[in-house]
Image (tube, coloured by chain):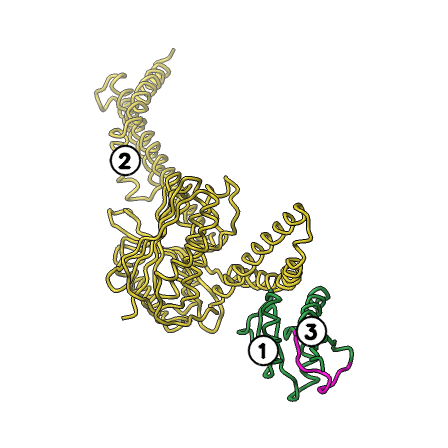
Amino acid sequence: MSFAHRRYFVASVAVAGIAATWGVMLAFSWSSKLGIVTFAPWVALLGFDLGVAGGIGGASLVMAVYLTATHYDSVKLDETQIAVRAGSLVVLAMGSALVGRRLKASEEAHRGVALLQSALIDATLDGICLTDAEGNILISNRPLRRLVGELGMPTHGTVPERLLALSGSITEPERYRARMLELAHEPGAASTDEFEIAGTGRVFRGYTAPVPEVPGGLRGRIWTLREVTADRELDRMRDAFVATVSHELRTPLTSISGFLEMMQDEEAGLGTSGRQYLEVIRRSTTRLHALVEDLLLMAQIEAKRIELTLAPVDVQAIAKRSIESARPAATEKGVTLELVTDHPPEVLADGTRIAQVIDNLVSNAVKFTNEGGRVTVSIEGDGDGLRLTVADTGIGIPRDEHGQIFSRFFRASTATRQAIPGTGLGLAISRALVEQHGGTITLTSREGEGTNVTVSLRATR
Amino acid sequence: MIPRVLIAEPNDDVRALLELTVQRLGYEAVYPEERTGRDDVDAILLEPACAVGRSVLRRFGDNAPPVICLSIYPREEGFEPSASVAYLVKPASTAAIGDALRTVFGD
């Protein structure tokens, strides 16, 4: 091996050894920082790609100077020293290049994630934004910006301010304004609200909820806005269909129940089986009639076509009548039914509708309570009104279903599992009627232990 | 003379029921296709939300005898004619229909 060849061989071994050392060092974050520091001036001067090339080129140039200087013997270095220094410079350049590549890959990865996130929130139909605790927008998506433009919402200010500015365009501006102000004063609350833009028929559902912590350690809020015009139109069509069908059902019901009445006059002439059959038909007709009436009442409520005839009402007397009408069913099931009252004040209400509410609650309680159980209706004065509670020791409602229990057609799984008949309309109707009176209805329940439904109404004075 | 009640109801079964109810009360049931005039009818029992009911009301105009409505729609729907003396929503009991007829005839 010639001198030159030996020199390059030694240099190559040195480079390989030092490269291996650098490789190990680069695997740790502190050595990466070293690489960045080494590489940084080049990148700062020349930009990323040129910086990498400059690093390599500069190192190569210095190595060439060393090798040339050695060749002319102007620098007194032995072969090993030359090899180590040259190798160090090459590896330094390689390290810088590796760090540069790593930086570039990291930057591209970050940019890719940001693009994906942006594509994700822009691709949804919902307008979405994240605000700080004061409501200043930190980030928003494209659908939201489009909706803001379409609704004529201001493009500046906090989200609550922008929403309030829409009041004049909403079908029920006072209710909307009150709701928005309420929301502004409940920063910790999650809320879903629907509003309709006057004169356009466009309906939107807004959702907002606190975000515990956003980057930077801030507490923030997420806001979403979805157009639900098509959903509401489908609801309207469904309600219209249900109402039409229900009205049409009244015609055959008239002939069934009418001829049943006629047959009662001739019931004595029927045998035992015939009388039993007649009783089944009578019972089914009554249920069908109640179902049709519930469906129609729900349709009226949805269409806001229920008008209350208000007068001072003795709720205690109404509750007594409800209990008496439910007593036969309770007795048949072996359920104790009782009224506990402390002579509450009269309330300003529509007696017929309040009776419907109490009938619903009491009949539900009896229906969902097994033999040996108890249903207690208690009425007590409560400040400027009264509180009526129907408590049972029945099958109860699972905790995760409490939020839906007042929705129309919703039935608790405990009821469906036991095939207890029902339409899921009773509580929805009750809530609508109570709220139309300006009252409240709440429910507490524990599966297997029982349910309490409480209605609060204001007194007449 | 036996009071005559014109029955204007589109459903055959309900019409048969009303006829039976009217006859059991001792009145006579007549139908729109019999081309009865004002002098031939003492009361009308009709479904106001149907073509036959509206046709009968048009035929009598302001000269209609007392009308008892028996409808699938509640009164708020606005089908009640001016000559209406009673408004019942289906499925009204035959007893309620009888009460309304007896009130018209003062029985």
- Estimate the x, y position of residue A52 in percent, counting from the top left: 35, 37
Q: Colour of chain B?
A: green
Share a chain, discs 1 and 3?
yes
- Residue A311: which numbered mark, if any? none
- Estimate the x, y position of residue B15 in percent, counting from the top left: 70, 68
Residue linked to disc 3: B26
Q: What kind of residue is marked 1?
A: Thr
Residue A146 position by quadrant: bottom left
Q: Vertical placement of A432 versus A166: above or below?
A: above
Q: Secondary structure under badge 2?
A: helix
Q: Vertical placement of A457 versus A371: above or below?
A: below
Q: Which chain is yellow?
A: A
Instruction: Give the number of the mark in front: 1 or 3.
Output: 3
- The residue under the point 61% across, 63% down is A250
Task: Name, please, the residue furthest toward the front.
Answer: A268
Front residue of A433 and A303 = A433
Residue linked to disc 2: A36
- Residue B103: which numbered mark, if any? 1
Q: Secondary structure under badge 1?
A: helix
Instruction: Give the number of the mark in front: 1 or 2.
Output: 1
- CA–CA distance between discs 2 and 3? 110 Å
Pointer 2 chain = A
Task: Give the magenta-colored segment's residue range.
Answer: B35-46
- The residue under the point 58% across, 80% down is B85
A330 with respect to A441 (left or right): right
Q: What kind of residue is marked 3?
A: Gly
A7 with respect to B78 (left or right): left
Neighbour tally class for label 3: few under 14, some 14-19, many 20 plus, Cα within 10 Å:
few
